[in-house]
Each structure stands twice: as structure tokens, then as C-alpha cells.
Image (tube, rainbow, N blue to C red):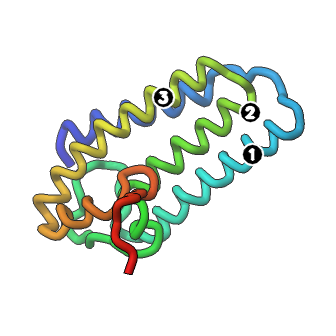
Amino acid sequence: MSQKDLILVIIQVALMLLFIVIPAGYAPPMIPAFLSFMMTTAGILIASAGVLTIGKGFTPFPTPKVSGQLKQTGIYKYIRHPMYSGIIIAGLGIAFYNANIPRLIVCIILWIFFEYKSRYEEKLLEQKYPEYSQYKTVTGRFFPSVNIFKKVH
């Protein structure tokens, strides 16, 4: 764990805590509430799938564990950073539920932060796993990659 790893995790935790302490807004009508609930649930499930798939290799720090292995199965077959994706989606669901602009802003800042953190993390993963560069070309960073130009056999 480097000093940069520690700083990135501290910023991430601070942003997530800021999101939590912002007071809630109002309760929306039934359909927006249901859609917000579905987003939040989907985010939690995506992040959980990432944690379960990566198992003992899980770390909040960008530097991969020495004993870790590159996962390309389960949720990692579709998304390179499902834990970040889950946090983003769940955060947006919660912010939309309360029509809470400050929470939405923090969620967007967190998304931008995850963009930066994941780019740094991927440089480290490419150093550790030579096959990571190829993996990046077929798997989306936060959401499944959609390539409409892929040839279907």
C-alpha cells in the first residue's frame, strides 16, 4: 500500500460519508420511488457481486494484492470495476429518490473520482497482469461495453 493508495481511499470514504450526512429531501410519488429503489438495489447487487467474485483479493486500495489474481469471470466478465459501478448506481438511486441536488452533486464528484482512481488502478493492474490490456478492450470500465460494430457469428 502506497501513500497515494491511502490518500485515494481516504478521499473515497470522505465523499461517501459526505453523501450520507447530507439531509434527505422529500419522498417522491410511487413510480419515481420504485425506479429509485430499483437503481439502489441494482447498485448494491452489482457491488456485492464484485466483492463476492473477487473474494480474498478484495482491497479498497488501488494497488492489487500480491497474492491476488485477475478476475475475468462473473460480473468481471462485463464490468472491470463493479464495486465502483455499484456505488455510483446506488448513490444515484438514493439522490433521485429524494430529488436531492447536493447528494446528486456528491455522487457525480464520486463518479469523477472513481474515473481517476480506476485509471491509476488499471496502470497498476497492467503492470501485474500482462493480459489486462486485452481484457480492457472487451470489458467496460463501469458499465458493460456495448460495441455495435462487433461482428456477430
Residue beneath disc 3: 108
Percent x, y of residue 151: 34, 71
Q: Answer left or right for 28 relative to 70.
A: right
Q: CA distance from mark 2 to mark 1?
A: 8 Å
The residue at the point 34 percent across, 38 percent down is 115
> Does dot 3 land on a helix, a strand or a loop?
helix
Which numbered disc, 2 or 1, marks the residue that appears first in the sequence? 1
* SS label for mark 2: helix
User: Front-most of 89 and 121?
Assistant: 89
Q: Looking at the image, is 46 positioned above or below residue 62?
A: below
The kind of residue tagged 3 is Ile
Image location of residue 19, percent across then percent down: 57, 28
Q: Which mark is residue 37?
A: 1
Say which mark, if any, is on residue 86.
none
- Label 1: few (<14), some or many (≥20) within 10 Å? some
Alpha carbon distance from label 3 to label 2: 15 Å
Please give the label number shown on residue 97. 2
Give the amino acid type for the residue marked by disc 2 in the picture: Tyr
In this rendering, does residue 54 appear at all? no
- Whichever of callouts 3 and 2 sits on the residue coming sooner in the sequence is 2
Q: Are marks 2 and 1 in contact (CB under 8 Å)?
A: yes
